Image (tube, rainbow, N blue to C red):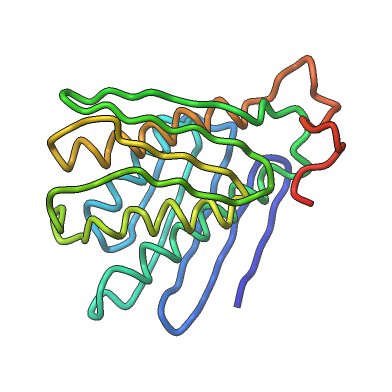
């Protein structure tokens, strides 16, 4: 069951399944304030980075079947954050659409390029040398980015160029997503009445 509300560049979405209960509320034109609780400490930390560096105000409440593993909680949260972004963007008029960010974190350098195109796609070139960060399986970070890209309707290229510390690698990817997303959804005052596509529409 999915419930949705949106007005302007603000959206709230909720989703209830036998595996998870997810609530997401966000404001694309916020100041990076966050209130996040998924039951997974490290994942909360990454979502907080996404909010703060994108300047998207973000509230997330996820209750999932953590007694099984963290997969459903991570994936369904990604779906709903992406869905909320898509809903808040409305008709996509005025956005810059394309952006990229190159983010260093100590010895690590990661890059994200994004196209808010309505066409979901993920390229993931990120490898980890550890199976877990805290209690979270590192393979689940790809699942979040995939779920987010699919639900938000964005083309997303994520690449860790180099790095050794696994915490730095994943955090730099989230921060790069945040900065790229911030720039891509920013409204350009020169094109406020136009969709950034020669087709005249995004998402079809």
Position of residue 50 measured from the top left corner of the image (x, y, whole percent):
40, 39
Q: Residue furthest bottom?
A: 18
Q: Residue furthest top?
A: 190
Q: Nearer the viewer, residue 45 or 96?
A: 96
Q: Residue at x 75, y 16 (%)?
A: 189
183 w.r.t. 202: above or below: above
Q: In the image, 107: left or right of 99?
A: left
100 w.r.t. 139: above or below: above
Q: Nearer the viewer, residue 25 or 104?
A: 104
Q: Residue at x 75, y 27 (%)?
A: 94
Q: In the image, 121: left or right of 64?
A: right
Position of residue 150 measured from the top left corner of the image (x, y, whole percent):
56, 56
Position of residue 166 measured from the top left corner of the image (x, y, whole percent):
16, 42
Q: Quadrant of residue 45?
A: top left
Q: Residue at x 62, y 32 (%)?
A: 185
25 w.r.t. 176: above or below: below
Q: Quadrant of residue 109?
A: top left
Q: How many marks?
A: 0
Quadrant, the N terminus: bottom right
Q: In the image, 187: left or right of 83?
A: right
Q: In the image, 72: left or right of 182?
A: left
């Amino acid at each position: 069951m999915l419930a949705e509300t949106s007005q302007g560049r603000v959206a709230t979405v909720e989703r209830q399944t036998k595996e998870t209960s997810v609530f997401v509320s966000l404001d694309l034109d916020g100041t990076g304030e966050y209130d996040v609780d998924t039951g997974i400490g490290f994942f909360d930390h990454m979502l907080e980075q996404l909010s703060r560096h994108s300047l998207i105000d973000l509230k997330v409440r996820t209750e999932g079947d953590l007694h099984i593993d963290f997969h459903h909680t991570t994936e369904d949260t990604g779906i709903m954050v992406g869905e909320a972004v898509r809903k808040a963007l409305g008709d996509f008029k005025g956005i810059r659409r394309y952006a990229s960010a190159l983010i260093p974190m100590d010895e690590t350098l990661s890059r994200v390029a994004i196209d808010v195109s309505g066409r979901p796609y993920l390229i993931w070139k990120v490898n980890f040398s550890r199976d877990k960060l805290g209690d979270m399986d590192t393979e689940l970070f790809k699942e979040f980015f995939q779920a987010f890209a699919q639900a938000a309707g964005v083309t997303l290229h994520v690449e860790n160029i180099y790095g050794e510390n696994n915490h730095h690698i994943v955090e730099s990817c989230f921060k790069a997503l945040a900065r790229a997303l911030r720039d891509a959804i920013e409204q350009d005052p020169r094109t406020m009445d136009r969709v950034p596509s020669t087709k005249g529409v995004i998402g079809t």
